[in-house]
Image (cartoon, rainbow, N blue to C red):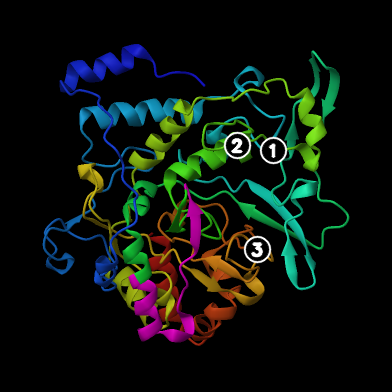
Amino acid sequence: MRRFTPWLFLLFLIITGCETHRLPLSTAPERASDLAASPSDSAALGIAESRDPTLGPGIEARRYTPLGGPIAGLDGAEMARFLAGQEEFEQQESIEEGLGPVFNEASCSTCHSGPVGGTNGRAETRFGRMVGGVFDPMTDRGGSLIQDHALGVVNTEHGAYTFVPEKVPREATVSALRITTPLFGLGLVDAVTDAALIALAQQEGRTSPSTAGTPHMVADKGMTRVGRFGWKAQVATLHTFAGDAYLNEMGVTSPDFPQENAPQGNSGALLYNPVPTLNNDGEAVEQFFDFMTFLGPPQRRPRNPHMDAGAAVFQQIGCANCHTPSMVTGDSPVQALSRKAFQPFSDFLLHDMGSLGDGIAQGQANGRQMRTAPLWGLSVRPTYLHDGRARTPNDAILQHAGQGRDARNRYLQLAPPDREALLAFLRSL
């Protein structure tokens, strides 16, 4: 893990005159009294203006920057942290730094490119089996995530050993692909309170019970939190998301994830791990966390009447029941993230998607449940849905099932001009 280039750090100190003390990014659970707080402004389909009266007192609209750039409003110290994080994000890890022994890629940027921080559609495999109606992730066989790269031949004090990529075992009855998710604007998502997401689920239960979502309650550092990251909303905080990625995607252990993955479940193979000690003291994870925290959200294309008509259709046929247009962050020590309205087009809740589910259970999420995929940045994605099976937004809509079936059927019933307006709206995101 390469450290932040000193000259770049000094340059920012000279330009801004700011000190670099790290402010804590609080993701602690909220008080029960906060549950009544309104989590979103479902009427705000476009980019909110800086003085939009619909946002409520003390709420600011999120200013947008080009994809791959930092969120607007960072001070000098925060910008320095973003750049240090971007350098770590682009760094190719080495065996000496703890890469492997099995892994998926050697760099975060390998999967999250096109543009920087996005997704290039890189697919990974998960597997498991059903036993008596219960999903078994087959951890004893390396499940549920496949690491499809390996170090190959290594020579250690214990002798030579050949590490090989993992494969789906013959005993597995479930196998699914998942494409990597974009990282844009995740600092804003992280700053939404647990209470807001719980309140949103309660609101959906009142206003659209047939499509209401369920918060995925997950364990995170000894607390129960609302999950929001990953295809199953199986990760609650961005910091945990960063550490999980270092371990499971690159094989790099850190203080929060100190246990190396046993290749194909074979713990004996770890005797030959070239770097058996803790691979990283947590600095690289912190830097990647900073990069994601300060990475700007996607920018909408300029609005026009045709897109606005499509936004109205989006609401009318029920897409917005799950793809919540607008949310507001809670208080944050980072001013650029505090009490900001943003437009992710997701409720970050679990929904029963029927045949569109991937069959993989994680935490409280069963094989039919998936997190509502955020639609912001849709126009720069190469493929759609969790496994990349859809090549166009139209294809993705037609694949909707379960709680998304009625909206799909209403889409099929649209007059051609209304359908095209809706697709134009989606292409603007």
Dot 1 falls on a residue whose secondary structure is loop
Q: Is residue 160 left or right of residue 380?
A: right
**Quarter-of-image position of residue 153:** top right
Which residue sits at x=44%, y=63%?
348
Q: Is residue 134 magenta?
A: no
Q: Say which residue label 1 marks.
A: 261
Q: Say which residue label 2 marks.
A: 247
Q: Is residue 173 left or right of residue 354?
A: right
* Kind of residue indicated by mark 3: Ala
Q: Residues within 10 Å of mark 3 (few under 14, many from 20)?
A: many
Q: Say which residue label 3 marks.
A: 361
In the image shown, does 192 or 399 lie closer to the viewer? 192
In the image shown, does 186 or 387 lie closer to the viewer? 186
- Dot placed on the residue nearer the N-terminal end, 1 or 2: 2
In the rendered view, would you say 99 is above or below 181? above
Can residue 39 be seen in the rendering of this structure?
Answer: no
**Could you say which disc has been placed on residue 399 in the image?**
none
